[in-house]
Each structure stands twice: as C-alpha cells, then as structure tokens.
Image: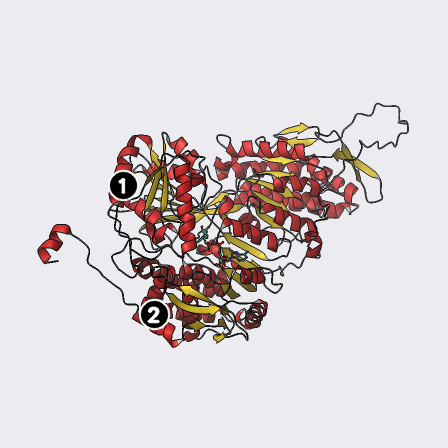
Amino acid sequence: MDILQIFRTMEYGPAPESAAAANAWLDEHGREFGLFINNEYITPRDAQYYPSYDPATGEKLADTVQAGQQDVDAAVAAARQAFKIWRETPGLIRARYLYAIARNIQKHHRLLAVLESMDNGKPIRESRDIDVPLLARHFYYHAGWAQLMETELHDYQPVGVVGQIIPWNFPLLMLAWKIAPAIAMGNTVVLKPASYTRLTALLFAEVVAEAGLPPGVINIVTGSSKAGTMIVTHPDVDKIAFTGSTEVGRILRRQTAGSGKKLSLELGGKSPFIVFEDADLDSAIEGVVDAIWFNQGQVCCAGSRLLVQENVANRFIHKLKERMKHLRVGDPLDKAIDIGAIVDQTQWNTVDGWVKIGVREGGELFQPDIKMPEKGCFYPPTLITGLDPAAQTVQEEIFGPVLVSLTFRTPSEGIALANNTRYGLAASVWSENINLALDVASKIKAGSVWVNSTNLFDAASGFGGYRESGFGREGGKEGLFEYLRPAWQERPRPDFDLSEATKGSSNWGTHTPSRPSMPTNGKANSNLSPQVDRTPKMYIAGKQLRPDGHYTRVVMGPKGEIVGQVGDGNRKDVRDAVEAAHAAHTAKPGWAMRHGYNRAQILYFIAENLNARSNEFARRIRAMTGRSLKSAQAEVEKAVERLFTYAAWADKFGGRLQETTLHGVTVAVNEPIGVIGIACPDEYPLLAFVSLMAPAIARGNTVIVLPSEKYPLSATDFYQVLDTSDVPPGVVNIVTGDRDHLVKTLIQHEDVDAVWYFGTGEGSYHVEYESAANMKRTWVSYGIKRDWLGPEQGAGHQFLHEATQVKNIWVPTGE
Ligand code: NAP
C-alpha cells in the first residue's frame, strides 16, 4: 500500500508489540512454575501441573502447579509466621516496601503488560495504559496508608492471615486491589489467581521478591477451585477476600458462616448505561464502546444494559451500529486493536450461548460485518435490541462483548429500569443537565456511578457493590476497613461446633407459641378490682398492634416472679414490620431522603423524652434484671448519651471528596443500607437496644428491632418515647418474642437488606449462612459479649460503618 492509498482508506497498519521479553522470561523458567511461598518457588513432591494457554493463538504458554492441601497449609503457615513480624513492622517501613514494589512494577511495566495480554487476551493498549499503571497506582496509594495507619487508624489492628481469590478478567489489577490494602494494614496474604490466568501473578511475585519484601508476606498459590476451597476453609485464615461470580460468592458466604472469619465479596453485575435525550450523543457512543467492549466486555461493571430515552433511541442505535462497524478485533499484541480475545473457549461458548438465548427471547441481533481473525478465541461486538426488561439476557450477567438495549420515556422510568436488577455494582448516566444527572446518580442503587463517563477507576476511590454484587469496598479509605478489626477485638472464635450445623438436624429458630399465659395461674383474682390486660403489643408502622398469633410470653424477674408479659411475635408480625419499614424507606420523602438535620432533631427529641422518664426506665430494668437501681440508672443515662451521640452523627457522616486522578469530582456518599433487621442481646436491654437502633436510623435506615428476649419490657416501654418524638411511622418497628425464631424470618426475607444479630454462636452461623440467598449484609456477635457501656465497644465508627454503604459518584469537569 502506498502513501496515497493509506490517505484514501485511512486503514490502520499493523503495530505489533514484541512478545520476545515475555517469551524469554517464560523460557528462563523452562515454562514451568512452582508455587510462590516465602519468596521462592516451591515445587511440591509429586506436583501435578496444568497448562496455561494464550487465547489469541491457542498456544501453550507454560505449566503451573495444581496446589493441594499440603501446599495450601505451607502457604498459610508461611503467612502466619510472617504476620508476627509484619504486623509489628513500623508503618513507615511497610510504606517503603509498598513504595519499592510500586517502583519495581514501573520498572517492569512493559513485561507485565505484554505477559498480561498474552495470558488473558486483552489488548496491549489496555494492559499497557490501564491495568499496569493502575497496579502501580494501588501500591503507591496504599504505601501512604501504611504510614498513616498509626495516626489515622490507631483504633484498629490488622486482621491476620488473609486468603484472597481473584478472577481472570483483570489478573494484575484484581491482585493489586487485594494485596496492596492488605499488606499496607499489616496483614499477610495467600492469593490464588484464576485458573485461566495465573502467569502474571507469578511474575508479580518475582517483582515483590526483587523489592525485598520479607518472606511469607505475599504467597501465591496456583490451583483450581479446589485450592480455593482449601484456602476458604483453612482454620488459620482470618479473612477471605473474594472477587468473582455471585454464584461462587454465595458458596463462600455459606462456607465461612459462623467461623468468625471476615469476608468481603466483590461479585457480578449487570450495570445500566443510561442515555438521556439531552446527552451529548457522540460522547455517549464512545462511552458505550468503553463500557461494553473494553476488555471484551469481561468487566464486572461493564455497562451491559443500555437504556436510551425513547425519542433519541433510533438515532442513538443507528449511530452505535455505525460505530460498531469500525471496531477492530484481533491480535491482542497489536497496538491498534480495540477488542482482543475472549479468555478461553469455554467462556466463548458461554457468551455465544447467551446470544442464542437472546435471539430466542425475541431480541434483534446485530453483529457488524467486520474482519475477524481466522483462529483464536475472538467474539464480535454484539448488540441485541427489542428485548423485554424481564428477559434473561437483560437480567443475567453475560460477561462478554454483548450489549442489550432497552428504551424508557421519563427519568423515573429510566431509574426504575436501571434498578430492576438483583445486582448493584455500577451505572453510567449521560445527560448535559447536571441536575438530572446527579439526581439520577443519587437514586441508582450501585456502588459506583459515573456521570458522562464510564469505567473510571482509581485507588483513592472504593469500588464494590450493593445487593447481590456483594459487600465490602476495594480502594479508598473505605476499603481499608476490610483488612482491619477494632483494636479491642480479637478474632472471634465461636464456641459453636460448625460440624453440628452441617448435619442438617438443627432445629434452630423453630418455635412453638406458648399458650396465652395466665399470671394468676387460674386462681381468682383476689383484689376485687377489674384486671385490664396491659400486655404491650407489637410496634409496627407507628401503631401498637396485637401479635398476629394472639399469644403472649411471660417476662420473669430475677427471683422467678412475673414482671410482665409481651406479645409472642410470629412470621406474620415480622413480615408486617418489614413491609412498614420498607414503606417508610421508600415513601416520598422516605426516611433516607430526609436531611441529616431533621433526623438529628428527632434523635435529640427521643433522647430528651427518654431522659424525662429515666427513673421509670431504671425501675423497669431493675425489676427485670435484679440489678441495683444505681446500675440501672447508669444504663439509662448511657442510653440517653448514645442517642445524643448518634443525633450528632446524623449530619456528620455523609461522605467526602475522594482525591482520585480524575479531572473533576469524585464524591464518596455514605448511603444507608435500607431496611435493617436488628436482634438485640440480653445484656443491657435498654442500652444495647438504643446503641443498635440509633446509629441505624441516624444514617437513614429503617429498622425492625427484636429486643432482648429475656428482658423486653424496656423496649416495649420505649414505644411511648417514640410516639412522642416525631419518629415517622415505620422507621422503628419492634417485634417481641423468640429472638432466633423471629430473626430466621428476617434473614430469609428478600426485602431486608441487612441483619445485625447479637446472639449465640449457633444463631450467628445461621444468620450468615442464610444471608447468602440474596447477599444481605450481616453483622453478628458469634456469641461473644461486648461491653455495651464502654465507648469503644458500645459506640463508635464500627456502628456507623455497619449502617452505611459507600457510593462513589464520578463527575468529570472541563472540556
Ligand atoms: P468465578 O468462577 O467465581 O471464579 C473466581 C475465582 O474463584 C477463581 O479464582 C476461581 O478459581 C475461584 N473459585 C471458583 N469456584 C470456587 C470455589 N468453590 N471456592 C473457592 N474458589 C473458587 O469467577 P470468574 O469467572 O473467574 O470471574 C468472573 C466473575 O467475576 C464475573 O461474575 C465478574 O462480574 C466477577 N468480577 C467482579 C469484580 C468486582 O470487583 N465486583 C471484578 C472482576 C470480576 P478457578 O479459576 O480455578 O476456577
């Protein structure tokens, strides 16, 4: 082709990146790798190897070890040994190690990028300009936190040995998101890369060793999902950090239930990409290209559901199809390629299977007539229009270069469609009207919302999901808490024997209602005056309602005397309470939409009204518990103080500006979780009740509280305090009865977003296990008592953290 022809066609020429250095590195190792433990490759005796292929060529790149139980044990032991020293290593020293790693990543930038593209199939343009720079950025950012931990996070300690399991779509980036915060906070790690992509994790391990990191701080174990299970179930692992599919996330939630291990789950998504009629359509088209064809659409937060406002939809789809005809699919090592190879043939088959389902569901398929490579795992950019919002292809994650498109008429319809998913990872909003864009951003239920942009990531901004996209954040200050526990708290070691749970014979949470109790025991009432039943009812939607079953429970005093009765709640009462809490949450304006100032005033008012009746409450506590009046008075005083504390926090925990690399504004908003079910302990029946309820409602959640089962009367007395304090109906609902029976209904309820359970080790197991069904957030006590009176354990940041989830809204500014 001569120059004239090039000018006429504007055809791209080949721009190949050399694979020579990566191949040389593979050859140096004989294309065979052991496990990376204690800063060296270990080849287990009788090692089983399995191959890793280049998906673009189908050629074998190398073999790595399939780890077994002994290998996982060795890696965990190395991490445990290293933890003893690493946790005591001064923050500045840890910072310097992270900094050294970052510098070494930059030194080996090109090698890392080329190997990543060969192993995964992603275009070199992306691995070179996005994955590896972000890898370095994460270590720089967290080097800073390693140093600042001593002053900024002195109430916290590292969790211990962390097991980390990552997917194949961003092998290096996912590794950085996991390892950098973990080791910055003084933890040591055992990381398992995905089976399709494990080579760059090993190259990274060498980079780490070159930086001189003490042996055992980072260990890389290759292997299948079986090795993953070995890490997850290992008794000496204190925390599991997982990124992958929601299905596997559910398995891990169940496997770790009741064990006291911390868990963070970064799961799947089906993120909306919403285009309003006033959007800059050409920019939005480029946005779509980035949203769904970046990394072949194998992106958890890919904008895979295109929602376009009806009156621009035809024009937009026409432009999009034109643009698709110019996408270039081909050799990942060609620098002028837009779309590389799908990671593996199995994944290719899955994607293709989904496209066929989409067509069967009535969708109209568009795949541009572009040049495709003759061999290798390549899939064309694909658009499916005309689907029903409930179609499987609209609802399920395809994880490939496949975009489905729907239309909407009004902003509220657009928001409803955007939220019509079990996921909640990310969203993209396109409009030139800043009021509209930010309003929509605030109403979408997702962890990241990009305004007039998409797929923006930075170490300074937390990333993670709502709903079935998981819980926990990676990046930002918010992400650090996944690798910390309060300084006062040791790793919970529940007394409950987990093997009991797996026998399937548990009758936990089953309950037979007692007959209506007769405190006079059938004898005639001797004092001749009529005895009116004063059994407190349930408190639901701001009303006192009789329990559905019309049964009551007797509340006994310390000497076995009867001090009162309460309703014996059942599933129906819990369901009514959830409905009321939900209505209060979503009503216009819902509790969450009220100003913090308004919520603060209501909490102050509750405090004032409780204070006015403090003697009455103290006497009630004494009657139920047998504690001295002085001790009961101290409890009431503390409860009043707690209400003041959370009134204070009601307008001071809204979020902050994140200092990302974006030219514009990235705001982290601490949003409420939604509807929270709270099961209170028996200790300090009023104080624990208030300490849990107050932070939840202060931060905009609505609650269903199950008060102490043994001492419920201070909670039922509290109805009148709520009634006189302007608390809107449904914000606080109280159901008395058998705590474990009632919490079982709460944890199984689809409309409950989180459950806090302060009860037995066995109950904690069940709550965590059952939460996997819709990935509720949980906070459980594992049967370990806390000091509710103390400022560290009875109040503080942990309570606010549990009451909120962070949404990051990215707003680029400028031309
Ligand atoms: P996956 O099948 O869930 O696997 C993820 C990792 O878990 C791999 O290392 C896998 O090992 C391992 N694994 C599989 N089954 C396991 C088990 N029972 N116990 C322990 N470990 C197990 O997911 P994937 O196909 O690799 O990745 C795609 C998914 O990741 C998508 O759903 C995507 O949305 C999600 N993702 C989420 C984020 C986020 O930040 N939210 C980021 C990236 C990807 P093997 O590879 O050996 O099977």
Local secondary structure at mark 2: helix
Residue at horizontal 42%, vertical 39%?
Answer: 394
The vertical placement of 263 against 408, above or below, is below
- Residue 738, compared with residue 240, is above or below; it is above
Report the side of 301 relative to 591 (left or right): left
Q: CA distance from mark 1 to mark 2?
A: 37 Å
Quarter placement of the N terminus: bottom left
Say which residue label 2 marks: 22
For mark 1, give the secondary structure: helix
Q: Position of residue 118 (x, y in %)?
A: 35, 63
Residue type, numbered disc 1: Lys
Q: Nearer the viewer, residue 250 or 262?
A: 250
509 to the left or right of 104: right
Q: Nearer the viewer, residue 367 or 294?
A: 367
Packing grade of label 2 (10 A; few <14, some 14-19, many >=20) is many
In the rendered image of this protein, does residue 249 appear above or below residue 451?
Answer: below
Q: Position of residue 244 (x, y in %)?
A: 48, 54
Q: Tell me the residue that label 1 is attached to.
A: 321
Q: Position of residue 589 (x, y in %)?
A: 48, 31
